[in-house]
Image (spheres, rainbow, N blue to C red):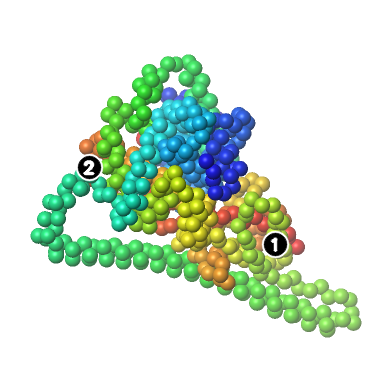
Amino acid sequence: MDALTLDVEHRKHVLTETAFTRLLAWLDDGADSQGETYLEMRRRLVEYFDRRNRLFADELADETLNRIGRTLETSGVIAVTPPARYCYVVARFVLLEDIRRERRYIHIEETRIATGPGAGGGADHDAAPSSEQRLECLDRCLHTLKPDQRELAVEYYRDAKRQRIDRRREMAKRLGISTNALGIRACRIRSTLESCVNGCCQDAMKGFHGSRPMTVGSSFKVGYAFLA
Amino acid sequence: MRFSREPALNDQLVQYVLGLLPEAETERLDEASVADDALASRLRVVEHDLVDAYVSDTLDRETRARFETVYLATPRRLEKVEFARRFLATVDRAAAVPVSLPAPRRARSLQAAAALLLAVSGGLLYQGLRLHNAAKDAERQIATQTQRATSLAQQLDDARAVARDAQTALERAAAAQRDQRSASAGPTAIAAPARAAVAIVLLPQTRSVGPVPTVAVPATAERVAFQLRLEANDFFVYQAALKDPGTNRIVWRSAQLSAQSRDAATIVSISVPASTLASQHYSLELTGIHGSERTDVVGNYVFQVDRQ
């Protein structure tokens, strides 16, 4: 547990290839998810830090995973199981350190970021994509979905004000699954779209206008934490 | 707003998202939101519904005020609301015109030019695209079939192992019976221990409290067969992990499996080595895998083992 309280400021963005490989294998816990478990854990950690009102949720999530990667690199093994639980333990330390640091320093960048409603965590907020660009990205991302996924998303989320519950119940019945399973399926498509739009907007800001194929579950961020 | 199922849990998650729970409960859900797959998924569904309700102005006044002061406190969540606004408008537009979703704006402006271009080189392009798509489809089908074939071969091996064990067990039981009959005048014969193969059907765990099924495993059994019933067959491939709930450690993992329809039910059959089972509770976590896409936990099956 000695890696839990390393200084975020000085150690962030330091993860060797060995550490990253070990981190992926450890998170997979015997299966090979091709990086999906890592991406899912990173998403959960970002959401956790964000719910705790941390402005740099992405960085804190990366710092959490980097610490675990470094521990795996130096000691080779982490006894605490399951991996997700250990991730939370480390994340909690990272959170507390961040809260302590906030009390000591004034975050000049935070005030700048906090004023921009278009901020999406880690993006360049001085050059935020326009509403038109975002809509275009959303259109493009929707078109990259498989037809059945697109239909499901449209049917599940349309017409928020009226008969949504009944419609969802009917959909679940038609598909032969529970409404809970349907909700999770629709939610997964929506989250993927959201990631796709963010990636598309970032690309647009870099002047990249080519389309990229996407399916649910794919992501543009594999290897994000590997910055050595 | 109301949710269609498990309203108590959903309401609690709404309170969690809006920062209305006591700190201890908040921390418990913090941990579960990272470490518990099912809760993490449910939380996202609830959060989306909450954001959608805000965007479509269906929250009551108190919840709306809370949402604006607490939820809209970070740029990331503001962005989620903005995304929801655009997303809901887009799906409503798409639902109103069910033929197809609106084409991307840039693409729309190029449609006339593209149509002209297509008219000129249409035949060649069409053939080329058809061939390209056919090749892609064939690749996909081969990959899927290969995956299925591997999975079915594994299931076949497992089924053969179980059948072999059952046959051996029957033979030994018959031999033991014969021995017992022939030695009836003398001291009681000790029957040869049966290498029994045990089989049990498990249903997915629900929130309702019910008896945990018990599997009696003879000391000499080599494998225990389980049939895991599914609520729905959403994936091509599944994988089961046997967990010790005491430590939450995975003690055994199956190969990749396919679901089968049997007696109007969908099941996944697995065969667990008996040597991995002690007298205690276990849970089998069944994960769905869709090609190279992400995986999802589709069910948990809890049972008690009684070693004999």
Q: CA distance from mark 2 to mark 1?
A: 59 Å
Label 1 sits on residue: B215
Q: Nearer the viewer, residue A209 or B143?
A: A209
Quadrant assignment, res B87: top left
Q: Quadrant where the C terminus of chain B lies?
A: bottom right
Q: Nearer the viewer, residue A18 or A199?
A: A199
Can you see residue B306? Answer: yes
Label 2 sits on residue: A209
In front of the other: label 2 or label 1?
Answer: 2
Label 1 is found on which chain of the structure? B
Quadrant assignment, res A1: top right
In the rendered structure, which amino acid carries the disc numbered 1?
A: Val
- Tell me: residue B12, above or below residue A148: above
Q: Nearer the viewer, residue B306 or B4?
A: B4
Q: Is residue A152 left or right of residue B12?
A: left
Residue A207 placed where, x, y %?
A: 22, 37
Q: Is residue B256 left or right of residue B125?
A: right
Residue positioned most to the left: B120
